[in-house]
Amino acid sequence: MAKRFLSPIVFKLNHSYNDIRPILQCVHNKKLHTEPSVKEIRIPVKWGHLAAKLWGSEHERPILALHGWQDNAGTWDPYAPMLCNKRPILAIDFPGHGFSSWIPDGMHYYPWDLPRLILYLKDYFKWDKVSLLCHSMGSIAGMRFASVFPDDVDFYIAVDSLIYDDYDLNQVVENYSRILKKLQALQDLKGEPPSYTKEEMIKIWHLGTTKSVSKESVPYLLERGAKESSKEPNKYYFSRDPRLKNILFSAEDKKLVETLMKRLKCPTLYFKGIDSPYGADEFSVEMRETVAQNNSNFECHFIPSTHHLHLNNPELIEPIIRNFLQKHNFIK
């Protein structure tokens, strides 16, 4: 295996986010063990850069870790230290999230750009294969990439999503006018957004996910998802691109989704949060069964946790992932 996967672009970032560190003090009681050293990465793209965190060796191909909608690479902070001694993990901030650049003004985020981003990373690093560890929106992007490029993925681990849930199409179309108007208005939005105390931010993020992210876990996301206000002392604002709130999640033809699912042939591990509302509708269950019928290397595990089970309860999935990777000879 080539030894030049990441070393050309690894460096320590001297960003101005140290002022958010006090928020992380409430994480200390939750840490499972001492976190290994983590390197910050910048990957050039046409509109700026992608930011990422690398756990483990920079000289072998890492597992690519993809986060969910409006989260960031910090979502893997509790879990990554458990595995990185076996395989390095590269967790990216999707465009508009975390420390990554926002897309150009006048544009909006499109879900199929994310599989293309995976292809870009594969080409940029000259990886022979892609190993995927994904959550929610990242899981859907990973599934699409693994289905469209079935020979380019050696394994795919999905946390609490495989496809978008089956929504009422009348409601989806009805929402389009509101979303498009909101996107139009955001083009002219300037200045600093509302700011909050760290305690308020934790509560807002917790409630904004319908309590899926526990209050104890929110600071992992705030480290990359908040900036100190320049106007109000000791207050912070959410730093992700506001356009992310209004993505057009277009419903796709069910036959198209089924065709994609049947092409998912790599070893696949899927976690379903028992307390999560996602992936529980009839069509999602049908597609999960379709994967099981067409892929002999598919595993599904139900975990007593929320949609953010990897973030809140990494100890529940760690042995399952380790056994899966050992079973298929991806780690020793």
Image (cartoon, rainbow, N blue to C red):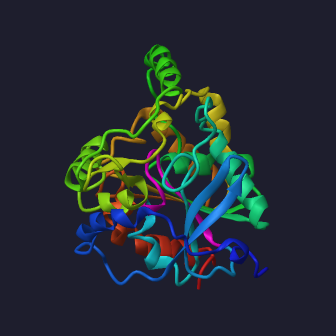
Residue 27, x across and y down, in percent: 27, 69
Q: Quadrant of the N terminus?
A: bottom right
In front here: 294 or 50? 50
Q: Is residue 72 magenta?
A: yes
Q: Residue at x 55, y 27 (%)?
A: 251
Give the quarter of the image for residue 118.
bottom right
Quarter occupied by the C terminus = bottom right
Residue 100, percent from left and from top = 56, 54
The answer to whether residue 314 is above or below residue 214 is: below
Question: Residue shown at 26%/56% (left/top)?
Answer: 214
Image-based side of 156 in relation to 148, left or right: left
- Residue drawn at x 44%, y 21% is 168
Towards the viewer: 28 or 46: 46
Q: Residue at x 48, y 82 (%)?
A: 37
* Residue 56 counted in the magenta span: no
Q: In the image, residue 162 lies at what x, y percent?
A: 52, 46
The magenta stretch is: 62-74
Res 282 → quadrant:
top left
